[in-house]
Image: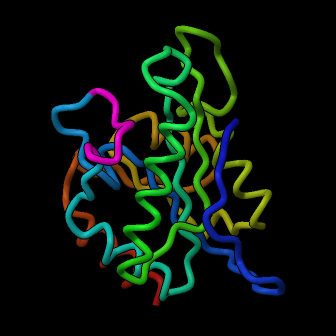
Amino acid sequence: MEKITTLQPAKGEHKSRAIFLDRDGTINSDEGHYYIYKKEDFVFNPGVIDGIRRLNEAGYLVIVVTNQGGVAKGEYTIEDVEAVHAYMCAELKKHGARIDKIYYCHHHDSVAPCSCRKPAPGMIEQAIREFDIDKSASLLIGDGGRDIEAAEAAGIRGIKIKKNSDLTPVIDHILKESL
């Protein structure tokens, strides 16, 4: 399982609530593309930047879990994935938002099965262990059935959204619930 760290919690800081986000179709639009692996093709969906900032301010860890099977299929490289993630994080930072960690699976079932590719819960379970996350106070937002299956398999709630939609109503609901 591949991952990149964008920002770790400060020493002694304990954040037990997390919002897991799928990437393509949830954070960014994948309209017109089968794979997003170039920063010039990366376009944030409506409400994402502000939503992530608001989740950060409310004390949630924001963790991305994304399948990137195009690597295994030879469509693009791990370096391409990491460049897109670096771009995404830099753009969020410009607006006072951050992603605490990105986990990605570069495998594909057509090449070799693994325990990290959603709907398997491997990436979520690794984050839960690494950050001591309270599963009952955390959830995953994704645009596909495999996202929700992964969340349920990891013991957290999943919220399925319409592909490439505005995240504002979902974030509003989460923040209202957590008060």
Is 17 left or right of 96, judged from the image as shown?
right
At 34% across and 73% down in the image, what residue appears?
171
Q: Quadrant of residue 172?
A: bottom left
Q: Which residue occupies the foreground of this view, 162 or 94?
A: 94
Residue 105 is situated, as x and y percent measured from the top left of the image, at: 59, 34
At 48% across and 52% down in the image, what residue appears?
85
Residue 54 in sight here? no
Residue 151 is situated, as x and y percent measured from the top left of the image, at: 55, 47
Please provide the residue range marked out in magenta: 34-41
Above or below, comparing residue 32 to residue 141 in the picture: above
Q: Which residue occupies the foreground of this view, 52 or 152?
A: 52
Q: Which residue occupies the foreground of this view, 29 or 113?
A: 29
Above or below, comparing residue 103 to residue 61 in the picture: above
Is residue 37 located in the magenta-colored stretch of the structure?
yes
Above or below, comparing residue 114 to residue 105 in the picture: above
Q: Residue furthest left?
A: 32
Is 142 left or right of 80, judged from the image as shown?
left
Residue 33 is situated, as x and y percent measured from the top left of the image, at: 23, 31
Q: Quadrant of residue 116?
A: top right
Residue 166 in sight here? yes
Is 128 left or right of 31, judged from the image as shown?
right
What quarter of the picture does the N terminus occupy? top right
Dominant SS in magenta: loop
Q: Quadrant of residue 95?
A: bottom left
